[in-house]
């Protein structure tokens, strides 16, 4: 299947290159002849194994070049059989004779992992490799705790320091792979050996001290950026692209472990004297709590105002967190109760937080964390800061990137493909205010920052923003927009490239465009693949003298009244929720699962998804139920949603899926929706229904799903709004 997807992606890329405008103009790189002395080894594995060589030391497995990666597996998808064996992918000699410190970094995908001993990064002193001597070298494991992925598209990244004992000599780096009975699949790309210390830039001191530059509100989605690991004994916290994980279990054995995950220093002086408390929030999963596991003692959250890099000498205050094992015994993250930061930590320039994990040799839990936030708020609802509405002539809200939620700038993630997912992060290097948005670059594809879908009247508009390079690699941007029809983007309309961005200077970018008719659009800024480096963007404005936002106010200084707030914990009208990001306040009511473990499930790409197909159709009935809404008496008030329906197979839609309304003062009735999806594909259809029948009443919405052994459709709901 993956090979077919890869082929189709390649064909699509060819057509996209020839037919679309979303490709950069020639970009002239700085070719001064300077040598990059920081890079000791650089191998992409894009089209071959390059400077690396496969040595199969046992059995029949080998490292090969496939999918632009170095790939090792013992599984043959054609014959559905496994081959046992051991293979080393040995790199060229790396000269560390004049190097004080160095580390290895690479991207990888690991699937069907059996244990950490089956795929490792190893190192040995210099030798001349051949088929007879590779297995006999004094290989030392540098890294084995690879994170298993859920697909073949999302790469994790490893950064591992080379021990000091290898400095001053030449070494060989190798990827060790073993297949036995049931094989994993390991893909690796962009392997580098760099001077310096893992996680630090070349200019960062060897022992960086907390700076306290991270002001409130502070957010770290994956707990990867800025966090450090201090392990007293046993296994380390592993920091992935989406979450952090601690466990002492590996290789069918448990290692007694004490390991700390330490936050960067956070400055809480901004909260000093405020009326609202400072709260600590995070999402977590806890699994495999066994007999004798002291849950309270083994999963701690601490704060310290004097941490200087040594967990043993710091003064730690227990924040009173009590971990609870997942009741559903699955890997669904759930929010920890908000922790109120003790008063002695408010108004401090440097506060450090720590997650301490412990296990004994009898049993180890697995503890996973993400979406760590420190912010002012209250204990009644999680804090999602109010988004400042447009001021002056600016039509856009949050154009200054000051308001963030779940690690993303509010309003700056589109529901369409205009946004490149997973490339945005918060930066303290701002043109104005506290924050800017960092747009990650990629040398193999253009990346895009996109504002949410807005409908503009006919008129002439001017986009203005400030940008600069985030690294010494420089940068480039290209502003524009793309029309949106039925949730699908059209052809991108770009302005000129702005090249030669530097890290020292903010550059003002301005681009004007004219719409001859009312048009739904995403405003976009391309980060071109040449040079494909990270950039910063701040203080974004959209102005017009003869247009405006449809459904908004012609005078942008007035507060809009029909803009959903997208705080899922606030059910006041206007209300909005993206099911790709949250299901807060909504519940699932399973009437008959028919033998399945679930029917409704959240999907971070497609929203809430209902399906009763698992290698066969099952007869089921399940509901996805909203919170109660007080519908205003003064209309008009609308319910809007975006949904897709597939595999109806010509059956009557109303027998399988319907949207229902349950008034507090009445009985359940079906909501009359005219434009249902065809039921034959995954094309999303937008719905906009006037709720005039329910003005002044309290109601609840029900997405009602049924299936039979003859028909089990798939229903996906991306977003839901109630607005004027």
Image (cartoon, rainbow, N blue to C red):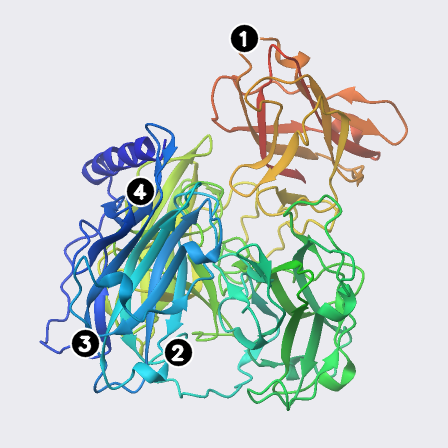
Foreground label between 4 and 1: 1
Contact, mark 4 vs mark 2 (Cβ under 8 Å): no
Please report the residue visible at 53 percent of the width from the left and 73 percent of the height from the top: 227
Count of number-bearing discs: 4
Q: Is residue 578 above or below residue 283?
A: above
Q: Is residue 628 above or below residue 448?
A: above
Tell me, for residue 200, which label it has, or none. 2
Please report the residue visible at 53 percent of the width from the left and 53 percent of the height from the top: 411
Residue where numbered disc 1 is placed: 650
Residue where numbered disc 4 is placed: 492
Q: Residues within 10 Å of mark 4 (few under 14, many from 20)?
A: some
Residue where numbered disc 3 is placed: 36
- The Cα–Cα distance between marks 1 and 3, rounded to whole angstroms, is 62 Å
Contact, mark 4 vs mark 1 (Cβ under 8 Å): no
Q: Residues within 10 Å of mark 1 (few under 14, many from 20)?
A: few
Q: Quadrant of residue 501?
A: bottom left
Tell me, for residue 707, which label it has, or none. none
Residue 439 in the image, given as x and y percentages of width and height:
39, 61
Label 4 vs 2, first from the N-terminus: 2
Q: Is mark 4 on a helix, strand or loop?
A: loop
Label 3 vs 2, first from the N-terminus: 3
Contact, mark 3 vs mark 4 (Cβ under 8 Å): no
Label 4 vs 1, first from the N-terminus: 4
Label 1 vs 3, first from the N-terminus: 3
Location of the C terminus by quadrant is: top right
In this image, 535 relative to 37: left or right? right
In this image, 114 relative to 341: left or right? left
Foreground label between 4 and 2: 2
């Amino acid at each position: 299947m993956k090979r077919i997807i890869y082929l189709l992606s390649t064909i699509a890329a060819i057509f996209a290159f020839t037919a679309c405008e979303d490709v950069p103009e020639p970009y002239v790189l700085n070719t001064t002849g300077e040598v990059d002395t920081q890079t000791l080894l650089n191998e992409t594995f894009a089209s071959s194994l390059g400077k690396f060589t496969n040595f199969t030391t046992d059995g029949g497995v080998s490292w090969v070049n496939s999918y632009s990666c170095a790939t090792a597996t013992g599984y043959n998808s054609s014959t559905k059989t496994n081959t046992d064996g051991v293979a080393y992918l040995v790199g060229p000699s790396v000269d560390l004779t004049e190097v004080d410190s160095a580390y290895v970094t690479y991207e990888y995908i690991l699937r069907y992992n059996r244990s950490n001993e089956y795929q490792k990064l190893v190192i040995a002193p210099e030798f001349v490799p051949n088929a007879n001597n590779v297995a006999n070298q004094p290989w030392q494991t540098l890294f084995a705790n690879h994170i298993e992925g859920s697909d073949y598209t999302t790469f994790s990244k490893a950064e591992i320091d080379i021990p000091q004992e290898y400095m001053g000599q030449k070494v060989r780096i190798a990827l060790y792979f073993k297949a036995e009975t049931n094989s994993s699949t390991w893909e690796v790309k962009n392997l580098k050996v760099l001077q310096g210390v893992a996680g630090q830039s070349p200019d960062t001191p060897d022992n960086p001290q907390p700076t306290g530059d991270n002001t409130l509100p502070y957010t770290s989605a994956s707990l990867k950026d800025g966090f450090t690991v201090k392990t007293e004994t046993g296994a380390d916290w592993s920091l992935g692209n989406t979450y952090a994980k601690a466990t002492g279990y590996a290789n069918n054995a448990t290692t007694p472990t004490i390991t700390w995950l330490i936050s960067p220093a956070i400055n809480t002086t901004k909260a000093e004297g405020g009326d609202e408390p400072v709260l600590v929030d995070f999402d977590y999963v806890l699994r495999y709590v066994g007999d004798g596991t002291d849950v309270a003692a083994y999963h701690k959250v601490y704060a310290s105002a004097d941490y200087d890099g040594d967990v043993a000498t710091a003064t730690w205050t227990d924040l009173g967190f009590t971990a609870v094992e997942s009741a559903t015994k699955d890997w669904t993250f759930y929010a920890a109760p908000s922790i109120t930061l003790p008063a002695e930590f408010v108004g401090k320039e440097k506060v450090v937080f720590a997650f301490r994990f412990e296990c004994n040799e009898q049993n180890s839990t697995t503890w996973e964390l993400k979406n760590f936030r420190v912010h002012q708020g209250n204990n009644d609802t999680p804090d999602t800061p109010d988004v400042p509405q447009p001021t002056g002539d600016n039509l856009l809200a949050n154009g200054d990137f000051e308001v963030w939620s779940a690690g993303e700038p509010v309003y700056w993630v589109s529901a369409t493909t205009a946004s490149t997912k997973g490339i945005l992060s918060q930066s303290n290097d701002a043109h104005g205010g506290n924050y800017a948005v960092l747009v990650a670059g990629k040398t193999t594809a253009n990346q895009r920052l996109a504002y949410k879908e807005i409908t503009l009247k006919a008129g002439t508009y001017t986009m203005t923003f400030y940008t600069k390079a985030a690294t010494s690699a420089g940068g480039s941007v290209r502003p524009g927009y793309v029309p949106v029809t039925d949730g699908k983007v059209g052809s991108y309309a770009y302005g000129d490239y702005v090249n030669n961005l530097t890290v020292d200077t903010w550059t003002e970018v301005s681009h004007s465009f004219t719409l001859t008719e009312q048009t739904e659009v995403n405003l976009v800024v391309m980060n071109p693949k040449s040079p494909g480096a990270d950039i910063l963007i701040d203080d974004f404005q959209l102005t017009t003298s003869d247009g405006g936002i449809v459904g908004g106010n012609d005078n942008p200084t007035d507060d809009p009244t029909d803009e959903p707030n997208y705080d899922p914990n606030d059910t006041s009208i206007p209300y909005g929720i993206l099911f790709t990001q949250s299901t807060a306040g909504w519940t699932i009511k399973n009437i008959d699962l028919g033998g399945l473990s679930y029917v409704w499930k959240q999907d971070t790409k497609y929203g809430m998804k209902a399906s009763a197909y698992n290698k066969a159709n099952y007869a089921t009935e399940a509901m996805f139920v909203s919170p109660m809404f007080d519908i205003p008496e003064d209309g008009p008030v609308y319910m809007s949603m975006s949904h897709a329906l597939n595999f109806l197979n010509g059956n009557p839609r109303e027998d399988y899926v319907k949207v229902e309304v349950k008034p507090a003062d009445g009985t359940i009735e079906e909501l009359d929706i005219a434009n249902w999806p065809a039921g034959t594909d995954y094309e999303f259809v937008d719905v906009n229904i006037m709720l005039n029948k329910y003005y002044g009443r309290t109601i609840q919405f029900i997405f009602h799903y049924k299936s039979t052994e003859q028909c089990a459709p798939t229903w996906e709901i991306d977003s839901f709004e109630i607005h004027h």
